[in-house]
Amino acid sequence: MGIIDSLTAFQIQLITTLIKFVAILVLALQVPPLMVWFERRAPALFQRRKGPNRVGLFRFRLFGLLQSLADTVKLIFKEEVVPDAANKVFYHLAPVIAMFPALVVIMAVPFGNDFHIGDHLITMSAIRIDSGFLFILALSSIAVYGVAIAGWSSNNKYSLMGALRASAQMIAYEIPLGMSLIPMVLIYQTLDLNQMVLQQEQVWGIFKAPVSFVLFFICMFAETNRAPFDLAEGESELIAGFHTEYNSFKFSQFYLGEYVSMFTLSLICSCLFFGGWQIPFVSYQTLVNLTGYEFIASIIGTIVLLHKAAFFMWAFVWVRWTLPRFRYDQLMNVGWRFLMPVALVNVLITAGVLSFIRFGG
Amino acid sequence: MAELVIFLSFASIMLFSSLMVITRKNAVPAAVYLVITMLCAAALYALMGADFVATIQVLVYAGAIMVLFLFVIMLLNTESDIEHGFQIKGPDFVMIALTVLSFAITCIALMAGKGAVNAPMETMPVDGGNTLAVAKVLFVNYLWPFELASVLILMAIVASIVIAKRDNAGH
């Protein structure tokens, strides 16, 4: 403890923040390769095929896990073809814009309870601001620019159609997503995600606001442009939609962004509705007493949270290979005529019940 | 010192992208640069310690309104790029003069009332964060003006729907 005592509070803050940034970044970037493999392996099992199960190390096949490594090498070493008629600046910028928000948003997720080293309070999220929950919503709404700019700058009809679809879909589903979360803010009376998780020690959020969960779950797929909402890249109509003109590493950047934002939304869904890093029926204090260190208890929380998020990652793949893609008018009808009114009524009823409970009617 | 460097870098990006907004020939890059301008404004709010305002700036302007703008522009823009680019004609000089004048007045006002401009930053409450501070001002001190403003916006929405409907009926 000698070294820690000699540092000032600011230095401690700086060092731990840097460590958290690097740790979360490394964690987040491990997800896409794993998911690429899983996304091919899981449907193979659904459809009674083998899937990619060959690439391994020497005699060990490792369930084909090294397929992702082979894919990565292929993507990096492929020749990069840039269309002549593309708007060069925006063409090169788009994949970065698509990837960047996902990597920033994940920094605001509380991976565990705050703990103390000496007298210093260390948070388990790299960015902690008091409206952290809004911060996540705000930055994840930026991601659509990556898709929109990619589609426009490629100077290709199909890409432009994909971009148009993506922005229209984004507007239609952003509103129900935000509205499905207003009841959660009303219930927890805070915008801080870690505070929300702390309040779920006894009862998970899904039991308090089941309708919100259903709305959030549907909008989650629309936000990440995943099937059955992947009309922006609907290959049966638009070749590959917004990324038709992209190849090699730029193409994989879109995929990185998609998988990381899937991971982030899974984490947020677990934090809001499924108790985040809390183990059911075991309080944080019990964990601290058992292990003896706050730090270890927080790390156990991280592992619990990752398991909960893994379930939703599985659900993303599960839904993709179970439900067919919507038709475009159906997508808009579901967004505006069904999700919007349900979300509004949900807010109204939750606010009514809560004000009845809190102020005695 | 670090704060000044961050401020200057964001402010210069903001200036550059605002210039790009008004000089682009094509509307799509102009809209994208406008998004960058808004994001830089959010960064400046955050630098002043107003997390909540910064977040709302990104959520509402960059995340919702500009997506809608970009959508409409891309929908209509397929071949209607303006070929002439940036041209200054007679009446525009009046506009430019007025802009420069208002900019000068703002600068003078800022320099004259330097203490007053800095005051709100120091009165920012630390406990409960600035989400609570904004909520208290909006829903306690200025509840009625706030509600009236929402009625005003509702009127604008209804009016725009009426105009759009009338156009459709005419054709």
Image (cartoon, grey):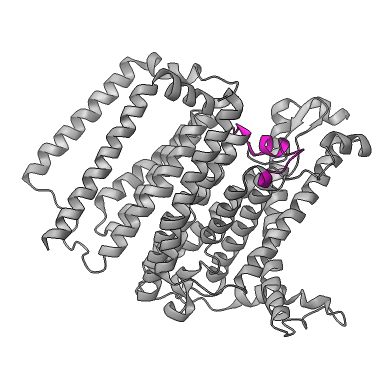
Image-based side of A233 in relation to B90, left or right: right
Q: Which residues are magenta?
A: A188-207
Q: Quadrant of residue A253?
A: bottom right
Query: At which x and y percent is residue B157?
Result: 27, 44
- Residue A139 visible at all: yes
Residue A48 lies, with reference to residue A157, above or below; the image says below
Nearest the viewer among A125 and A354 is: A354
Nearest the viewer among A137 and A216 is: A216
Query: At which x and y percent is residue A133?
Result: 58, 40
Residue A99 lies, with reference to residue B55, above or below; the image says below
Residue A213 lies, with reference to residue B104, above or below; the image says below
Nearest the viewer among A294 and B118 is: A294
Query: If the image is split into quadrants, where does the C terminus of chain A sit?
Result: top right
The question of residue A189 being in magenta is answered with yes
Disc tally is 0
Image-based side of B60 in relation to A287, left or right: left
- Residue A138 visible at all: no
Residue B163 lies, with reference to residue B53, above or below; the image says below
Q: Image point 72% across, 60% down: which residue?
A: A311
Q: Image point 43% across, 79% down: which residue?
A: A237
Query: At which x and y percent is residue B20?
Result: 31, 50
Image-based side of A181 in relation to B97, left or right: right
